[in-house]
Image (cartoon, coloured by chain):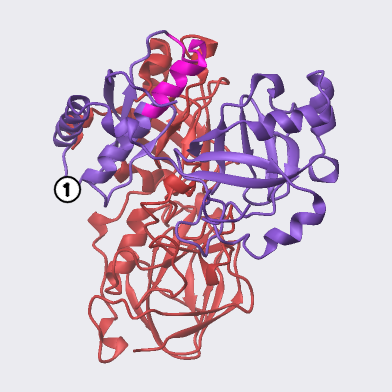
Chain colours: A red, B purple
Amino acid sequence: MLQIHLSVLEGGLQTTLQDLGRTTGRRYGIPPGGALDRAAHLAANRLVLNQPQAATLEITLQGPRLLFETSALIAITGADFGPMLDGRPIPMWLSVFVRAGQTLEWSGDSIPRMVEPKRNWGRVCYLSLHGGFAGPQLLGSRATYLKAKLSGYNGLGRVLQTGDTLNNTDEVLRPFRHLAEGAGRTFPEVERPAYREVVKLGLIPGPYEENFSEEAYHLLFSESFTLLQASDRMGFRLKGPLLPHRSPELAEIASCATVFGAVQVPLDGQPIVLMADHQVTGGYPITGTIISSDLPLLAQLLPGGKVSFHPLSPVNWS
Amino acid sequence: MVSTRPLNFDFELKPMGDTALLARLRLPTEHYSTLNTTVRQERLLISRRLAQWLQQIAPENEFVAGYDSVLIPYDPSKTSFADQVEWVQSQIAKLQAADDKGLAAEKSRLHRIPVVYGDKYGIDLEEIASLKGLTPQAVIDLHSCATYTVYLVGFSPGFAYLGPLPPAIDVPRRANPRPKVAAGSVALAAGQTGVYPVNMPGGWHLIGYTPLLVFDVESDPPVRFLPGDQVQFFPITPEQLPDYEATRHDLTASLSGSGVD
């Protein structure tokens, strides 16, 4: 087995191991978790011929400094924070061969990108490593669950820190005789999510439509909402016109199990979108759920980003 | 607790996005909050029964019961919404056609959980006693004489909502949640009781402490309490705490018949 080693020189703002999450943890109170931007995670793995579930690094706003102790095949997808190898920019959405001794750094966080519209802009990017990042699995997943300090790096449930070391697994789709053979693969532009600061998301109404007034749905589908600072891997909070319940009592329900993308509306009438690390049950009525293929657009939004919704029928959609 | 009448229930299937259905029991009134405890218990039992039924048919998926609903995730790249609805409807029909033998035969596990009540182990015990016009010992007696059912596991990993709480010791949640409640704290509020699995913020009233872990990531499954389990608490003294240290990681050692108490 090919051994690849990396040393973490600086952890970055919030760098965690993520994958597609776990499908059997809700009964234990463990949310599905996994990458916020599934599309970028999957693309990163595909570029280096990994399994879809292979763990990548989810990098938030400010990237880590990583020293490659051995050569490696990597790809970076999602938001463009300006990745550089030994000071030279490397393209996103491309498999790249890294020589032993090279250091991955970033030219800047995503904030300046907001005033530089030519470049990509967003919240998270994904770094894949041929072989996938190693680590103990919990319920079939290495996804870091920060709130409960579960899984992820060495099973410690935390962000990467200076001094951590990373290596690969041998779970690959096709082994290379030499890693450099895998370099130069690019991910088609048309298949990449169309990230932007103003997004329109498909939403399937329900399962608690009757808890809301007609006006609530009129506002939901005609007005725009602003993403608030108080947004994280558990939930994204939106601010917009107040979405009224039919009565104050209907602002609470008997708790039901929930999914990534469900839009809860508590008594204050302001929507909360449940994200990857959402609590497994919720007691606020769910007005609708964002379709899974549009979640990457939301996941990449920064505070101040604008969201609007258009209604979809589950029948036509699937 | 166990229904002996024929099953009679009415689930409506609603989409939760393009990756799940929510089977919701139709409400006989406008608000769930107006239903009495017996009706709520029955709705929970039926929801859990549907989740179990589906779990047996499709063990590779996970079906999660809420208080009166069941989450039914599916993979939209493999199954259409219409096909999924049809499949669930047919399973609900089969469950309804089956008599309630399954429900009656639901053999629940019984846990016996040691608790040091009061003092520094349960700092709200005195307050609850005075609020309810009881002695602290009466609160302990009432809490440890009841048999609770695990309604849901949620809020955080391994946190089991246990009920019903005897009304004589029922109090609302604290006005101000504490920023940190220690793992193992035994608490009650709003008709329910439970054990904090890890150090975390909490708004329930703390009446005691158990040395047993209720969540342990090294175990499979990682939780002590599963939906439908029965739970009893019994008082121990602080001096007895070391007796339980050796087996605190064994999440099945609290099951009655396993010889812990």
Residue A198 is inside the magenta segment: no
| Residue A145 drawn above or below residue A103 | above
Residue B16, how many percent across, how many down?
33, 33
The main secondary structure of the magenta stretch is: helix
Q: Quadrant of the N terminus of chain A?
A: bottom left
Residue B173, quarter of the rendered image: top right
| Residue B6 drawn above or below residue B252 | above
Residue B102, how many percent across, how many down?
28, 34
Residue A84, how many percent across, how many down?
48, 75
- Residue at image point 53% right, 61% down: B217
Q: Which residues are magenta?
A: B30-45
Disc tally is: 1
| Residue B183 drawn above or below residue B179 | below
Few, some or many residues within 10 Å of mark 1 (<14, 14–19, 20+): few
In this picture, residue B245 sits left or right of residue B66: right
- Residue at image point 68% right, 59% down: B244
- Residue at image point 39% right, 55% down: A22
Closest to the observer: A175 or A228? Answer: A175
Q: Quadrant of the C terminus of chain A?
A: top left
Residue A38, how many percent across, how many down?
36, 54
Which element is circle 1 on? loop
Asked whether residue A188 appears in the rendered view, the answer is yes
Residue A186, quarter of the rendered image: bottom left
In this picture, residue B174 sits left or right of residue B99: right
* Residue on which the image places disc 1: B78
Closest to the observer: A124 or A82? Answer: A124
